Amino acid sequence: MKKNNNLYFKPFLFLGFFTGIFSAFAQNESYSEPVENKIEETIFVNLKDYSKDFVYDMKYATEDNFLKAKVYDCAECFLRYKTVKALIAANNDFIKKGFRIKLYDCYRPLSIQKKMWEIVSNPKYVADPKKGSIHNRGGAVDISLVDLNGKEVEMGTAFDFFGPEAGHNYIKFSKEILANRKFLKKIMTQNGFNSFDSEWWHYNLKAGLKDNVSNQKWNCN
Ligand SMILES: [Zn+2]
């Protein structure tokens, strides 16, 4: 009797299963095709549209940088969508531990890269615009950490300090500073980013290294 019951209900279970598949497929077709999903990962988006949990200190939107010029019209953080997703995941990990990411630079138009290279033509500190920086590809961020009171974590040097002290291999700092750099690196690496030996603040999304260089200007409205 029990076996018969099972047989009786099975067709309905199957019908329900296929109806579910079919409606999911139909929804997929009407809202987004797989090809569009793939492009979406690489489109440029504004970080603030996806998270309010970051601290902004966009140095190139001020004169407080090594160019001594305000080269961005506004202090926005544009990145490819996949970079934004990884950065938010990293920030959530930092928040759980009582910190937040502070942003110095995100996407950087190629024209700005050329200006930087004219001033500092040293690939240890500025990428040659002929090759292009990962910043020009929307896959790099320059960051530090602040605690939940907004107090900056001590990292040993200022952002864009061009000297060996800015490097991960420089160890003549206090234990606290070395631990802070290590903490930043650990969480970023766990979330898909690579560190850069000569700059403690620079992180590249591993999945963004081969994206195209871009020279678009973003909308400041
Ligand atoms: Zn950088």
Image: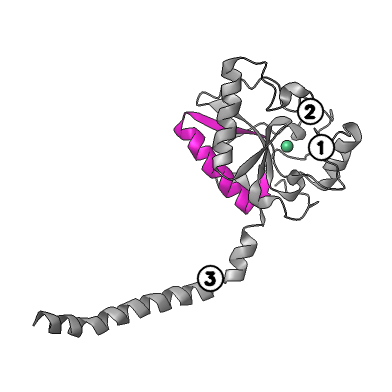
Q: Mark 1 points at which residue?
A: 71
Cα–Cα span, label 1 and label 3:
39 Å
Above or below: residue 28 compared with residue 8: above
Residue 125 spot, x, y in % from top left: 80, 33
Residue 182, position as x, y percentages in the image:
58, 28
* Amino acid at dot 3: Tyr
The secondary structure type at the circle numbered 3 is helix
Start and end of the magenta stretch? 78-104
Confirm or reject: label 1 Cβ below 8 Å from ligand 1: no
Secondary structure found at label 1: loop
Q: Does the magenta stretch include residue 34?
A: no
Whether tag 1 and tag 2 are in contact, CB under 8 A, the answer is: yes
Specify the label residue 31 is tagged with. 3
**Mark 2 or mark 3, which is nearer the start of the sequence?**
3
- Estimate the spatial distance between the alpha carbons at disc 3 and disc 2, rounded to whole Å: 44 Å
Residue depicted at 70% across the width and 21% down the height? 157
Q: In this view, does 69 lie above or below 33?
A: above
Q: In this view, does 177 lie above or below 59?
A: above
Between 126 and 39, the residue placed more toward the observer is 126
Q: Do the residues labelled 1 and 3 touch (CB within 8 Å)?
A: no
Residue drawn at 76 percent across, 55 percent down:
212
- Figure quarter occupied by ligand 1: top right
What is the x, y in percent for residue 72? Answer: 78, 39
Whether 79 is among the magenta residues is yes
- The kind of residue on which mark 1 rests is Val
In the rendered structure, find residue 65 and report the number of the disc placed on it: 2
